Image (cartoon, rainbow, N blue to C red):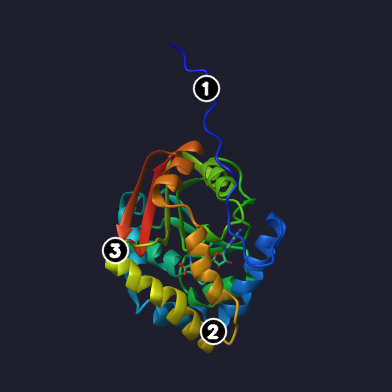
């Protein structure tokens, strides 16, 4: 029998910083926020994560070694910020001249990435993840570390990722999660109280480090995120928790 039911509709969900009333306002607030913390972003990242972020980037890059070590591979690191995920991809590529490009919509973040990457083959471009300046089917791999959660429309973001990937291309979205149990309870105290206090002190800016736990709470749980990925056209989707689920990697194939 043919199933004539409509596929279940997923309500529009995306980042919603305080005071943002629509998709454009949310994107603008996110860009201004990252621009305001760009000068201290790397320091804050390493202090607040006790350097575990380096492990997460490296682990993510390793999962895609089979693509990165292909000489013809074209790779896009979306929401690349100051480029640490992008550098991990470059290291995993080793001597292979994979073409790796980082994209972000904050000029200030990209400026720092560009300074850090002098003498490497990495390239950077200013672009909005919801409206990428690339034709369809351009990339073999697309990664995004701790950036996807900030998009004003997750489904539109996934559709844009699927559009720019070649058939058989892969995506890896690394982002925060909410661990369960006692670790989860301890972590929530750190994430909601300690982290915003230290973040605000070091960056000198109040909003962003209160937004961070709120954005993680708002982000879909793994099962829902995997549904959204399937809906956007990805197959073989999976989620691998890192560090008890504090972070995790979503993978999918086009
Ligand atoms: C938390 S930082 C992550 C940076 C880097 N990937 C890392 O792992 O450190 C999030 C980045 O996503 C970027 N971003 C958020 N929304 C974006 C969008 N719609 N288009 C492009 N970049 C975006 C921000 O400007 C910021 O640099």
The structure residue drawn at horizontal position 62% and vertical position 65%, both measured from the top left corner, is 17
Q: Quadrant of residue 135?
A: top right
User: How far apart, in angstroms, are the residues tagged by discs 3 and 1?
Assistant: 38 Å
Q: Which residue is mark 1?
A: 5
Q: Which residue is mark 2?
A: 200
Q: Nearer the viewer, residue 126 or 176?
A: 176
Instruction: Specify whether 53 is left or right of 125.
Output: left
Q: Quadrant of residue 24?
A: bottom right
Q: Badge 2, how many Cα within 10 Å: few under 14, some, many 20+?
A: some
Q: Badge 3, how many Cα within 10 Å: few under 14, some, many 20+?
A: few
Q: Is residue 109 above or below residue 92?
A: below
User: How far apart, in angstroms, are the residues tagged by discs 1 and 2?
Assistant: 49 Å
Ligand 1 falls in which quarter?
Answer: bottom right
Label placed on residue 112:
none
Q: Is residue 78 above or below residue 205?
A: above
Q: Are marks 1 and 2 in contact (CB under 8 Å)?
A: no
Q: Which residue is mark 3?
A: 181
Visible residue check, residue 165: yes
Q: Is mark 1 within 8 Å of ligand 1?
A: no
Q: Residue furthest top?
A: 1
Visible residue check, residue 114: no
Instruction: Specify whether 27 is left or right of 96.
Output: right
Viewer-nearest of labels 1 and 2? 1
Q: Is residue 52 above or below residue 72?
A: below
Coordinates of residue 187 in the picture (x, y in percent): 36, 72
């Amino acid at each position: 029998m043919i199933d004539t039911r409509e596929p279940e509709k997923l309500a529009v969900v995306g980042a919603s910083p305080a005071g943002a009333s629509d998709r454009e306002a949310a994107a603008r607030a996110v860009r201004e926020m990252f621009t305001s913390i760009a000068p201290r972003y790397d320091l804050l990242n390493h202090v607040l994560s006790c350097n575990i972020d380096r492990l997460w980037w490296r682990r993510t890059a390793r999962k895609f070694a089979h693509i990165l070590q292909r000489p013809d591979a074209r790779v896009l690191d979306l929401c690349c910020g100051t480029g640490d995920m992008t550098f991990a991809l470059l290291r995993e590529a080793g001597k292979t001249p994979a073409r790796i490009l980082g994209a972000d919509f904050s000029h200030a973040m990209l400026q720092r990435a560009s300074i850090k990457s002098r003498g490497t083959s990495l390239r950077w471009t200013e672009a909005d993840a919801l409206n990428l300046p690339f034709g369809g089917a351009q990339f073999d791999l697309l990664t995004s570390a701790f950036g996807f959660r900030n998009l004003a429309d997750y489904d539109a973001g996934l559709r844009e990722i699927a559009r720019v990937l070649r058939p058989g291309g892969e995506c890896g979205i690394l982002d925060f999660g909410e661990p369960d149990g006692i670790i989860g309870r301890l972590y929530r105290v750190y994430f909601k109280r300690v982290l915003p206090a230290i973040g605000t002190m070091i960056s000198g800016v109040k909003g962003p480090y209160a937004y961070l736990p709120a954005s993680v709470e708002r982000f879909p749980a793994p099962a829902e995120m995997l549904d959204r990925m399937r809906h956007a056209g990805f197959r073989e989707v999976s989620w691998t928790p890192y560090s008890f689920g504090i972070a995790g990697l979503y993978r999918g194939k086009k």
